[in-house]
Image (cartoon, rainbow, N blue to C red):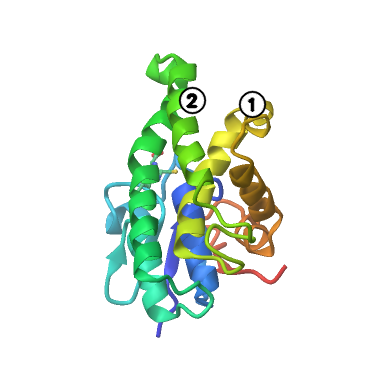
Amino acid sequence: MKQPILYSFRRCPYAMRARMAIYLADIKCELREVYLKNKPTEMLEISPKGTVPVLQLEDRVIEESNEIIQWAISQNSKKLMVLNLEQQDFALKTIHEFDTDFKHHLDRYKYSQRYNTEPQNHRDFCDEILGALDKNISNSKWIFSDEVSLLDISILPFIRQFKIADNDYFFNQKYLKVIKLLTQFEDSSLFQQIMNKYDVWSSSDNNSVLFPTAL
Ligand SMILES: N[C@@H](CCC(=O)N[C@@H](CS)C(=O)NCC(=O)O)C(=O)O
């Protein structure tokens, strides 16, 4: 099989979740780091909508992070926790909530000038979602158990963005399990592996890299 090509941007939460899924599935790919203000034509030719991540396979292109995750799981799911039906239902509902409501309010909290919004109102909505999640987090390492799951990799990059908007605020909130979960995520080898820094790719420099890269 020809190696898949992943167009990625290091700090993008969608690209982060896709890289985690690829990493956990033990898939090797060619990673092309994208500068969002100057996207490579090679990427736009296969995915004109112009968002990352994009995964180019031999026979098709996958342009949505959740679909890249599903593809990676279909290749190899051994390193992800097997969810029972109830957990699966909760995971899918929660991922949807983070991709819609949480992301909506996060953007309006984080980029209040751009959206001309009152940041605290939107921060309150995010807090509500994080407070509800807190009640469903186990006492183990990850949300359900000591094994990382689809839910962890899908939503933690967005919780991290919320934290980064105001570190002091985040660490003073009552959702202690969310705070602990995010802290251990950022300390994990999984996170270190997928946050490796790469130069921006260009076809003329021909500087794509192998992902994951041995650290
Ligand atoms: N629904 C897409 C969203 C991806 C997305 O919005 N990515 C952002 C970066 S975090 C992007 O590429 N934005 C385009 C731009 O900024 O030009 C997915 O899940 O893959």
Which element type, helix, strand or loop, lies under badge 2? helix
Q: Residue at x 54, y 35 (%)?
A: 162
Numbered badge on residue 191: none
Q: Amino acid at mark 2?
A: Arg
Q: Residue at x 39, y 71 (%)?
A: 84
Dot 1 crowding, Cα within 10 Å, few <14, some 14–19, many 20+? few
Residue ID for mark 2: 123
Residue 182 appears left or right of 72: right
Which element type, helix, strand or loop, lies under badge 1? helix
Q: How many dots with numbers? A: 2
Residue 193 appears left or right of 57: right
Q: Amino acid at mark 1?
A: Tyr
From the viewer's perspective, is residue 210 above or below residue 124?
Answer: below
- Near-viewer residue (206 or 6): 6
* Residue 142 shows up from this direction: yes
State if disc 1 and disc 2 touch (CB < 8 Å): yes
Q: Position of residue 131 (x, y in %)?
A: 50, 37
Residue ID for mark 1: 169
Cα gap from disc 2 to disc 1, whole angstroms: 10 Å
Q: Position of residue 118 (x, y in %)?
A: 44, 14
